[in-house]
Image (cartoon, rainbow, N blue to C red):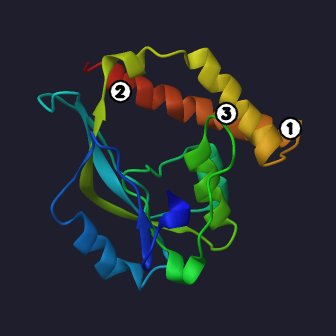
């Protein structure tokens, strides 16, 4: 994975997701004017790409604190200039690894820059919508406390905001699926 990455830039894609044809060109064109970390908006479709379920438009900029509240950075659209920011590795945890990686980079810079244009397509399977949300809550809380080492009060603050945004996104997708 990351240890074997060569070149100036690092990005991720799962086999069943799709970058739009200009994803790489758009990111390469913008990266030099940024702090070295970009993410893009993306569309969400069902597994067969026949039904659009929604679109996540990322904010123009997101700080460390903003990502603790709601992780708007998708592995599918993250684009990092490792020649400037270095290689960071996902934390050795079972869940929330991607958020852990983004937060490592955001401790080095002020913000990730968001591209409002949808540059990718993320497939959502029905099984993933019905997966155990209680476990997700537990993993998010554990992440705040054990990885970021936030106090109970600070964790509670971020956790409550994170739950609000998560529920909003979940119900938006669920209503169309």
Please give the label number shown on residue 174: none
Residue 57 shown left or right of residue 152 in the figure? left
Residue at the image position 60 percent from the left and 29 percent from the top = 163
Q: Nearer the viewer, residue 19 or 150?
A: 19
Please give the label number shown on residue 140: 3
Against 175, is 153 above or below? below
Task: Pinpoint residue 14: horizontal percent, then vertical percent.
Answer: 35, 45
| Dot 1 crowding, Cα within 10 Å, few <14, some 14–19, many 20+ | few
Q: Which residue is mark 1?
A: 153
Q: Nearer the viewer, residue 27 or 155?
A: 27
Q: Secondary structure at mark 2?
A: helix
Against 97, is 59 above or below? below
Please tell me which of labels 3 and 2 falls first in the chain: 3
Residue 149 shown left or right of residue 128 in the figure? right
| Dot 2 crowding, Cα within 10 Å, few <14, some 14–19, many 20+ | some
Q: Secondary structure at mark 1?
A: helix
Residue at the image position 60 percent from the left and 62 percent from the top = 63
Please tell me which of labels 2 and 1 falls first in the chain: 1
Please give the label number shown on residue 172: 2
Against 46, is 174 above or below? above
**Of circles 3 and 1, which is in front?**
3
Task: Pinpoint residue 45: horizontal percent, then vertical percent.
Answer: 23, 33
Against 173, is 14 above or below? below
Please tell me which of labels 3 and 1 falls first in the chain: 3
Q: CA distance from mark 2 to mark 1?
A: 29 Å
């Amino acid at each position: 994975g990351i240890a074997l990455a060569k070149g100036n830039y690092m990005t991720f894609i799962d086999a069943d997701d799709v970058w739009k044809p200009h994803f790489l060109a758009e990111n390469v064109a913008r990266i030099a004017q940024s702090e070295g970390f970009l993410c893009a908006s993306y569309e969400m479709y069902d597994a067969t790409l026949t039904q659009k379920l929604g679109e996540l438009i990322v904010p123009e900029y997101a700080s460390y604190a903003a990502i603790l509240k709601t992780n708007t950075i998708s592995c599918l659209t993250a684009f990092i200039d490792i020649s400037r920011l270095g290689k960071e590795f996902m934390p050795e945890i079972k869940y929330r690894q991607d958020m852990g990686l983004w937060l490592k980079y955001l401790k080095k810079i002020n913000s990730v820059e968001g591209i409002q244009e949808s540059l990718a397509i993320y497939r959502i399977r029905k099984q993933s919508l019905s997966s155990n949300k209680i476990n997700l809550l537990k993993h998010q809380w554990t992440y705040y406390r054990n990885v970021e080492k936030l106090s109970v009060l600070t964790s509670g603050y971020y956790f409550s905001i994170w739950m609000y945004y998560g529920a909003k996104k979940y119900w938006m997708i669920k209503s169309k699926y």
